[in-house]
Image (cartoon, helix red, strand yellow):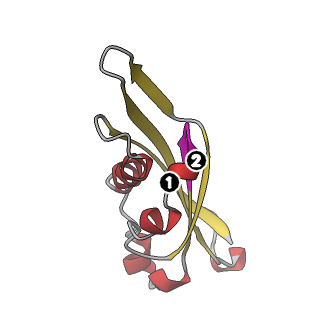
Amino acid sequence: MKRIILEMGTGNDLYGEDYTKAACRAVDDALHHSSLILFRSLGFDHADMDVRVTIAVQDPEKVDQTIVAAKLPRGNAAVQVVKGGLDVVDDVHNAKSVIATAAVEAYLDIDPKDWVSA
């Protein structure tokens, strides 16, 4: 499998302290930066694409990976959650805002012999 795209995104939940919501918003942000027209242009099937998502948040156990994977409109999704992102604590109101980052990588089984260099 060859990586054909890498997109990054950020997302947040400012008031609900919901890590999954912030992660989903980060994935949405990343997806809105890309268009995989090579599938249509070259006749590849989206079902053959693997999509690996890495989410970074301060409390990885609070992210529902199944919900995040469901945000991907195409491909075979795999989600990994790691420590990162940012929590902004509001001590005055005893609350925090959750900020997540996402890396979305798409992979396709491409035979290098099918490509000609110019």
Query: How far across and how far down the image is residue 71, in percent?
Result: 38, 66
Q: For the N terminus, give its image quadrant.
A: bottom right
Query: How far across and how far down the image is residue 55, in percent?
Result: 54, 49
Residue contact at pointers 1 and 2, CB within 8 angstroms: yes
Identify the residue at image location x=40%, y=47%.
26
101 in the magenta segment: no
Q: In this view of the protein, can residue 104 be seen by the observer?
A: yes
Query: How far across and how far down the image is residue 44, in percent?
Result: 48, 83
Query: How far across and how far down the image is residue 74, in percent?
Result: 42, 75
Q: In this view of the protein, can residue 44 be seen by the observer?
A: no
Amino acid of disc 1:
Val
Q: Secondary structure at mark 1?
A: loop
Alpha carbons under labels 1 and 2: distance apart? 6 Å
Identify the residue at image location x=49%, y=85%.
47
Residue 108's mark?
A: none
Residue bearing the label numbered 2: 60
Of residue 39 and residue 22, the one placed in the foreground of this image is 22
How many callouts does the rendering have? 2
Q: Secondary structure at mark 2?
A: helix
Q: Residue furthest top?
A: 92
- Horizontally, is 12 left or right of 65 in the view? left
Identify the residue at image location x=31%, y=41%.
16
Q: Is residue 49 above or below residue 25?
A: below
Q: Is residue 56 above or below residue 6?
A: above
Stretch of the chain drawn in magenta: 54-60
Amino acid of disc 2:
Pro
Identify the residue at image location x=49%, y=47%.
102
Residue bearing the label numbered 1: 63
Q: Report crowding for label 2: few under 14, some 14 to 19, many 20 or more residues within 10 A (C-alpha).
A: many
